[in-house]
Amino acid sequence: MKVLCYGVRDVEKPIFERENKRFNFDLTLVPDYLNTKETAYLAKGHEAVILRGNCLATPENLDIYKECGVKYLLTRTAGKDHINIPYATKLGFKMAFVPRYSPNAIADLAVFHTLMHLRHLAYTTSRTAKGNFTIDSFMFSKEIRNCTCGVIGLGRIGREAAKMYHGMGATVLGYDVFQMKGIEDFATQVSLEEIQEKADIITVHVNYQAGDPKLIDKNFLSKLKHDCILVNASRGQLADGNAICDAIENNTLGGYSADTIENEAKVFGKDFTGKEIPDPIIARMVSLYPRVLISPHLGSYTDEAAKNMVEISYQNLQDFIDTGDCKNKF
């Protein structure tokens, strides 16, 4: 079967090829994202496509897929909001996703973002890169062992982040809509209000479904401890960018980091050096560097996570071929 894989970076090609030895699909690996009619027509002659985040399976692109003979629409992500699922279902595509992959990859990035804020490393190293080796008052830091870290969302990723904070000596508080078992050795489950009141650092690791209300909004931010560091390791749609910028500019929020931002498809994967960023909220967030730190959706950009995502995507397709069904279908 001919399979078109979008958004494949050079460093990922060996993983796609190595994992395919078990399946023997006829692969076409392209660096392009699905975001135009031209990229949709790349699927001509393929029965299956494997998308990644920010590949936009809009009705227009899905119509092109139908015209090209695509039958299987897979995404190598846990998120599915880049696909117009009702329309794809109407057209009869068989669809599947990757419900989980290396939780350490996402947790690592969230914790590293935290430490960059806590020790002001982005600010400090940007100065030394310009030849300024002086120390100023902004660089003065708290040690993480003297901090209370709040983890919102105690799924697989949130638990890994909590373990890391605990391992560095922090007091760890966790919140989840479900009562979690087996976390007592590294975290104490409390209410969301208690985390907002007590946490010096908060990382967010919650699920998102299209249409969910924003979690990180003006009201949420108003309840945080002064100078709190906040890291969004979930979806960009959960955060109100303008409210975050207001809190940074008012010096009530100590720092904000995100690996995903709302409307990120407009900018991620593109170079705007010396140019105007086309989204005003994203541009405002970028202007607040280094108190706002944005990484371009690279939480899963690790060897283990990429292997998991590719292997499960291939298996999803093979299950459809063999049985007409798949446990990860949607």
Image: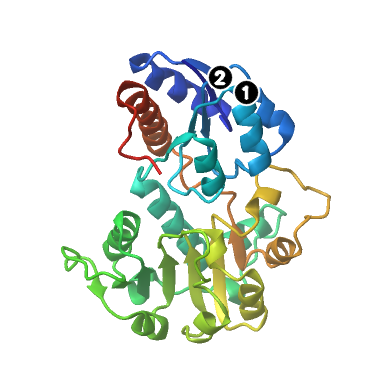
Q: Is residue 83 visible?
A: no
In x, y percent, where is residue 319?
Answer: 32, 27
190 left or right of 209 in image? left
Q: Nearer the viewer, residue 85 or 188?
A: 85
Residue type at tag 2: His
Q: Is residue 169 above or below residue 254?
A: above
Task: Name the residue carrying label 1.
Answer: 68
Q: Earlier in the sequence, mark 1 or mark 2?
A: 2
Residue 245 image-quadrant placement: bottom right
Which element is circle 2 on? Answer: loop
Q: Nearer the viewer, residue 113 or 180?
A: 180
Residue 236 point in image, percent of width and height: 56, 60
Q: Element at badge 1?
A: helix
| Residue 46, numbered label | 2
Q: Disc 1, disc 2: CB below 8 Å?
A: yes
Residue found 59% across the figure and 58% down from its top: 261
Residue drawn where x is 73% and y is 65% of the image: 287
Q: Position of residue 28 (x, y in %)?
A: 56, 19
Classify residue 183 as left or right of residue 46. left
Q: Residue at left 74%, top 43%?
A: 271
Task: Please tell me which residue lies in front, 297 or 131.
Answer: 297
Q: Marks 1 and 2, Cα distance to the nearest angstrom?
A: 8 Å
Report the side of 260 relative to 263 (left or right). Answer: left
Residue 223 appears anywhere in the view: yes
Q: Quadrant of residue 181?
A: bottom left
Q: What's the residue type where badge 1 is placed?
A: Cys
